Image (cartoon, helix red, strand yellow):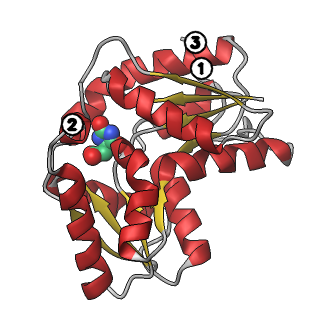
Amino acid sequence: MRIHVVNPNSTSSMTDKIGACARSIASPGTEIVATNPGSGPASIEGQYDEAMSLAGLLAEVETGERAGADGFVVACFDDVGLGACREIASGPVLGICEAAMHAASMIATGFSVVTTLERSVPIVQDLALRYGMERRCRRVRAADIPVLALEEPGSNARQKVLEEIKRAVREDRCDAVILGCAGMADLTAWLTKETGVPVIDGVAVAVKMVEALIGAGLSTSKVGAYARPLVK
Ligand code: 5HY
């Protein structure tokens, strides 16, 4: 099968990192295609960036659909444009936030999320409500780092994420922590080792969940809200 992973921001180094993470966990028979729009916001930090990323995201999904992708992952923790992507795709489309929250809810009684900037906290809180996870999400925290700091060798971004996870474990009664940015995907094993709790990366779990859904013969329902867009 082929899973198309779309990074909705236009930073190709992050796409490369996301693709490497996806390929490292994909099953032998799964081809991973990882792309990003050629233009649009370099990072998605808030609702304006989300809106500006949508056209590029949808163009990538349309290209993937025409190329015969069996499923998609939207690799941005804001789960931007998820419903719209589901309308134009045939196969399953998972957002990394939704996938991570469901995975966390199946291995832990409660989880916290550590994202990048404070402005993203209410966005993730709204997603927890949308996904019915408000009783399992102990807290959404920000490590106070710009998204692109995760792309800068030598920045202290990874250390700030580690410290925030340690605070979450101490203060939130959480027994798992979700990484609230696709750009953190390469830190998962190190953070799990350093903190002693399951640290969940949405890119990895979304890839495995798309594989599972396809393996179960499931695809996006076209008889309701995810029916193909009406021709105008
Ligand atoms: C992401 N922004 O996963 C989100 C999350 C965040 O460019 N990729 C981005 O940190 O807001």
Q: Amino acid at mark 2?
A: Pro
Q: Is residue 84 visible?
A: no
Which of disc 3 and disc 2 is earlier in sequence? Answer: 3
Q: Which residue is mark 1?
A: 230
Classify 10 Å Cα crowding around label 3: few (below 14), some (14-19), many (20 and above): few
Secondary structure under tag 3 reads helix
Classify 10 Å Cα crowding around label 2: few (below 14), some (14-19), many (20 and above): few
Secondary structure under tag 2 reads loop
Q: Is residue 13 visible?
A: yes
Res. 63 mark: 3
Q: For marks 1 and 3, give the CA distance.
A: 19 Å
Q: For marks 2 and 3, give the CA distance.
A: 32 Å
Which of 126 and 35 lies nearest the eye of the viewer?
35
Q: Quadrant of residue 183?
A: top left
Q: Quadrant of residue 105?
A: bottom right
Res. 153 mark: 2
Q: Position of residue 29 (x, y in %)?
A: 80, 33
